[in-house]
Each structure stands twice: as structure tokens, then as C-alpha cells.
């Protein structure tokens, strides 16, 4: 997947991307939170299994999405100062 330079993207496209990435971040973080709760109760009821570790494997995806949201927000803020 090719990385694009945020400075070359139009402002309206960047705003749409920001809203999309932000919504995806909140949904993903919420789902991982629910996964933590469910896996905790599974661990209490049935002991340790591989499904208990599943939320841990999704944390990097949430962090990467959060970093992308921050980069886009920073670029949008720099454009509004001009």
C-alpha cells in the first residue's frame, strides 16, 4: 500500500479522511474494550485459553489508527493557521 504525503492532499479530502479515521478509531477502540471485558469473563469462567489473548493482538491496530488520526489532525491544524 502506497503512503501518500498529507501535504499534497486537498483540505476537503483530508477533512473527510479525518472524520472517517476518527469514527473508525472510536469503533475499533470500543470493540477492543468489549473484547477485553468478554475475555476477562471467559477467563474467570473457563480458565486460560487462546481467546483470552485476542484483545492484546488488536491493540497495535488501535494504536496505528490513533497515530493516523493525530497526523491528519496536525496537518489540518497547520493549514488553518495559514
Image (cartoon, helix red, strand yellow):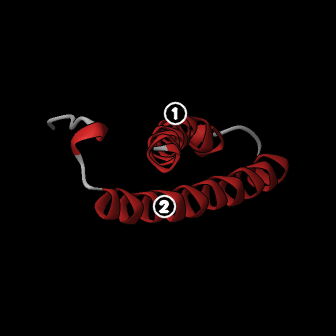
Taking the spot 54% from the left edge, 40% from the top edge, the residue there is 70
Q: What element carries label 1?
A: helix
- Between circles 1 and 2, the one closer to the viewer is 2
Relative placement, left or right, of 60 versus 35 is left
Quadrant in the picture for the C terminus = top left
As displayed, is residue 13 above or below residue 6?
A: below
Q: Is the residue 16 above or below the residue 81 in the image?
A: below
* Residue at x 72% of width, y 50% of height: 36
User: Does residue 9 appear in this view?
Assistant: yes
Depth check, front residue: 38 or 21: 21
**Residue in the picture at 47% in, 36% down:** 64
Rendering coords of residue 3 (x, y %): 21, 34
The residue that mark 2 highlights is 24
Query: Does residue 41 appear left or right of residue 8 in this picture?
Result: right
- Residue 35, by quadrant, is bottom right
**Residue 8 picture location, percent across and down:** 21, 41
Q: Mark 1 points at which residue?
A: 60
Q: Residue furthest right?
A: 44
Q: What element carries label 2?
A: helix
**CA gap, disc 1 and disc 2:** 14 Å
Amino acid at each position: 500500500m502506497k503512503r501518500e504525503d498529507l501535504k499534497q492532499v486537498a483540505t476537503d479530502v483530508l477533512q473527510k479522511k479525518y472524520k472517517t479515521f476518527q469514527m473508525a478509531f472510536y469503533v475499533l477502540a470500543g470493540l477492543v474494550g468489549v473484547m477485553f471485558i468478554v475475555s476477562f469473563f471467559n477467563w474467570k469462567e473457563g480458565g486460560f485459553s487462546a481467546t483470552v489473548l485476542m484483545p492484546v493482538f488488536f491493540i497495535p491496530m488501535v494504536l496505528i489508527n490513533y497515530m493516523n488520526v493525530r497526523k491528519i489532525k496536525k496537518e489540518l491544524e497547520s493549514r488553518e493557521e495559514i
